[in-house]
Structures are given as C-alpha cells and as structure tokens.
Image (cartoon, rainbow, N blue to C red):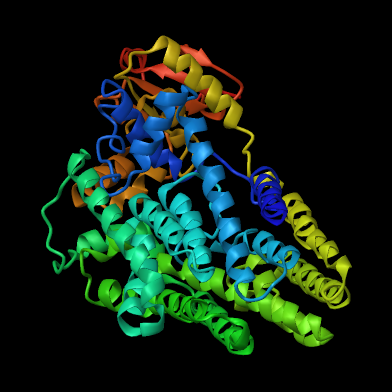
Amino acid sequence: MRRALLRLLGVAVFTWLEFAVFPGHTYLRDGTQLSVPMIERLANPGFLSRDLVATHPTLQFTAYDEVTLFLNQITGVGLEKSLVIQQIVCRGAGILGVLLLTLSAGMTESLALLIAATVNLGATLAGPHLMLVDLEPVPYALAWGLIILAIGLLAREKPLLAGLAGGVALIYQPILAAPFWLLSIVMLVVDRRLRRLLRPAMTVFAVFLLLLANLAQLQPGIAEQQSVFDRIPAAYVALQQFRSPYQYVSLWSAGQFWSYLAIWIAGVWAVTRIWPVLNRQARWIFLALSTIGVLAMPVSYVLLDRLRWSAIPHIEPTQWLLFTVCLSSAACWIGSIRAAQQRRFWESAIWLGTPVLVTAHAEVLESFRLIGAAESGRFGVAILFVCASALLLTYTAKGRARVVALAIPLFAMGVLAFSSSSNVHPSSEQQVIALADWVRANTWGSSMFLFSDLDRSTDPGLFRGRSERALWVDWNSGALVTCFESFAAAWWDRWHTTMEPGYSPRRLQANLFLPIDYYVLTRAHRLYGIKPVYANEEFLVYDANDLRNASGPLHTAAP
C-alpha cells in the first residue's frame, strides 16, 4: 500500500509539473479552436448557427463532446475547466502507463518514474503535425494518455483494467486506439500463451465497441456520401495540400521521413538489448506497435499520395507514429539505465541520445545539420544533457541514491520551459479576450464577424471560442478542409476573397455586400473618418452598416 501511494504521489507531482511548467497547456490556441465551437453549438443551438466550423462537426465518432457536456452539467464549471479536468486526468494516465510499462521491464519505482517523467516531456512531430503531449485538450491527446495506460496495464498483466482504459480511449479517438486493439486481437489469435490473459480485455472491447456505435448514431453530424475507394479529385487534392500539407507524406522533408525511421531502428535495437527482461506481452508491444507506426508512412504515401483514396485523410494513419516515438524512447531509456547499472557510461550515453534528441527535436537527423546558431546551441545543450544524465545514472543507478536521478526531468523541464516560454501565451491574447467579452455583452448571438487583416493569425479562432459568435472565415478553420469537400469549397472561396494575405481598404469595401455584421481590424489599419463601435489597445470593431454608408472610398488613417 505504501509503495502504491508513493507511486501515485510521484505520478501526481510530475503530472502537475508537466501541466504547469513544461510542456504546459493552452486553450483555444490550436485544436480546441475547432472542437470547442462544435461543443458550444451542441450546448446552445441558437449560437454559431452561421459559423462554418460549428455547423460542420467532426465529433460523430467520439464521446469527447458528450463527456465534456456531462462534466459541465454536473459541475457547472464551464467548458474550459471541464476540458482541463479531462486533460489532467489523461496526462496522469500517460505518465502512469509509461511507469507501469517500465516496471514490467524490471526497473525500480524511482527509475520507472524517471523514465515516465522524461518520456512525457513530449516531442513535436512536424511530419504528421502532432505532439506526443499536446498542449490542448483535443480528442487524440486525451485518448493517447489512456492508450499508454492500457499498454502499461497489459504489460503488468491487468487485462480488465487495460481493457477499460483502452475502451475509453476507443470512444475518445477510435483511429488512434485501433493499433492497440488490433495488436490485442492478433496476440489472442496467434499467441496461445497470452490467450488466457487477453480474453477479459476482449469482452470489455466488445462493450465499448457497441457503445461507440450507439454514440455515433445519436451524434448529429454532416454526412457526405463518399465511397472508401473513391479517388479525391485533383482540385480537392490541391486544396488539401495547400492547407494541410502534413497529411501528404510526399510533401514531408527527407529529414523528417528518415528521422522517424532512425527512431524506430534505435527502438528496435534497444528492445533486442533488453529482450531478456521483457515479458511476453511487453515484447509484442514494443516491437509491433512501434513497427505499425513507422509502416504508416509508406501506407499513407501509397493510399493517399499515389492512389488518392478518399478515406485516408479521415484516418490519418501517420498519427500512429506516436507509438514509434513513445515506445522507442522508453526502450532506449531502459537500455540506457541497464547499461548504467553495469557501469558502462558510454553505452548509457549512446542509448540516452535518442529520447533526449527526440524531446529537443523529433526530427533527430535534422539536429545534426547544425544550421544556424540556435540549432547548434540546442544540439550542444542536448549532448551535454545526455552526458551529464548518463554520468548521474551510472553512479546512482545501483545505490539508494538513485532517487537523485529524478532531478533529470526536473532540470529538463526548467530548461525547456525557459527556452519556449515566449511562444505559449501570445501578447494579444488578453486583448482578444477583452474584445470577446464586449461582443458577448453587446451583440446578437447570430452576429457574423470578420478579422480582415490578420491573415494566418490564431486570434480569430480564439475570439470565436470566447465570444460564441460566428466568423466568416479564418485560417485555423481550414484544418477541416480534409474532412468535407463541401466545407473545403466554401472555406477556400471565403478565404481567397476576404482574408488571403494582402489586406487593403479597397478589398474590404469590395466585400461589404457579404452577410457580415462586424469587421475587426488592428489599430495599424484604422479607417479614416469612421468611428469604431469598440476599440482596445490592439483591435477596432466597425459596424458593417457604418462602412456601407461611408460617404467615399475607405482608406487607412494616417498614423
């Protein structure tokens, strides 16, 4: 009992540090700019009825919205805190999952916690446009922590609990959870020695599969008739590649492709080194799931880039690279610690290189190019950190002082948080929130807004989520281009006409016939002779009727 309490305390401490320090958390800065308006419209159908994002929901095959609305209803804390509660729980699940997985490989409690904390420092996967620990409470991020917990519980021979965690992950994000359940089914069929262990999990899987099907039937959504084997039209491909090039492997850099392959090779090599200490199911997990991740790249290339199958953008198989990066990092950490326990400093440092470089820059081969002072400095810090950590592990891993090694993730969190703090909270955020508060109090719920001069800024999406008012168009909403062809056509027409880079008062005046109620401009583009209905340090809001009734051409006021 004492050991279990200390384990949970360690998980809780590092979950809090990961949430508050590094990687940290954000809200309405990326993925939640799309999911939150969809949930807001479900909660209040009278709002956002003219917004492209809110009226094209993508939450049909997930319980993400139902759970969020349920938490909001029983707690009354609002959507943001309801999502934050889920985010904290799922991040804790991810840390606990890695801890259990490494315990199954013979690591002590303190060393397993060290590995769990450092693996969950995260990594940015630029190729598939994902994060190992996403800053926002979006469906795949919540499901990912639960999947890792399911993996850890299965490795520790807790099939019912593993099935429960994996089942909840399934109803949060079925595509991301699919490799775990596919592997479980394969092990059940192929490996006789694991059948008794896996049967209870399969019963739980069937229950959650039925639950997911029922939720999908009840969830309102936009259904477009499209066969799995339909080919994506050339014009639609061009638009997808313009807005979401990360889905097309052929558009990735060579360094990204080869880096993920190198991470997989390092992970498989590490597994062969630690093979004797892994139980049967852990061997399956480390080898099969990491291999599924790396195979997703050629599969996506063939089916989407070459054959252009319409189902692939919805599946996004390259998201399975999360398994490759996470499990390879954990395997290399275990290999490093085992080498340190045998006083092999250089071998420990070499194994440690992969997870440290992954955290600093997931495209590990790109790290060796040393282009510019910033990249060279980051690479140098990573190497010093590897050597210092290997030295600390070598001289503490066998004795009671090994708990000192927990200083490694604490130090890494501090360094990484300091180097990235300037990007987490943009300076305009408070001004957007102030604008949204005024809009909620002073405009109709059906009002339509356009931020005419912000190009690809994330501020309009933040405004939509905070104000519950419709946007005519913004850059971030274009992420739904790959989901609906009808949405893609509407989004492109609006973007190209009103917000494509190159703002001018003349273009603004030419678009005054559109059903937009308010135009928002930055102070740098203040209009001459027209009084805004609201102004703060960053933004000016103009009533569309005032612009239409202007006595002459619109032009920017002199500074």
Where residue 138 appears, x then y in whole percent? 44, 46
> Is 427 or 291 nearer to us in this picture?
291
Is residue 168 among what the camera can see? yes
> Is 203 or 113 nearer to us in this picture?
203
Q: Using residue 251 as the reference point, say whether residue 263 is left or right of it.
A: right
Question: How many discs appear?
Answer: 0
> Is 556 or 333 nearer to us in this picture?
333
Which residue corresponds to the image point at 83% horizontal and 84% vertical from the top-left?
345
Where residue 211 appears, x then y in whole percent? 26, 48
Which residue corresponds to the image point at 37% horizontal and 50% vertical from the top-left?
172
Q: Can you say whether 552 is above or below 311 in the image?
A: above
Is residue 178 among what the camera can see? no
Which residue corresponds to the image point at 27% horizontal and 71% vertical from the top-left?
304
Q: Quadrant of residue 241?
A: bottom left
Q: Quadrant of residue 373?
A: bottom right
Q: Can you say whether 47 is above or below 98 in the image?
A: above
Where residue 147 appears, x then y in whole percent? 46, 60
Location of the C terminus (image quadrant)? top right
> Is 497 or 199 nearer to us in this picture?
199
Q: Can you say whether 190 is above or below 81 in the image?
A: below
Where residue 175 appears, x then y in whole percent? 33, 61
Which residue corresponds to the image point at 46% horizontal and 50% vertical from the top-left?
142
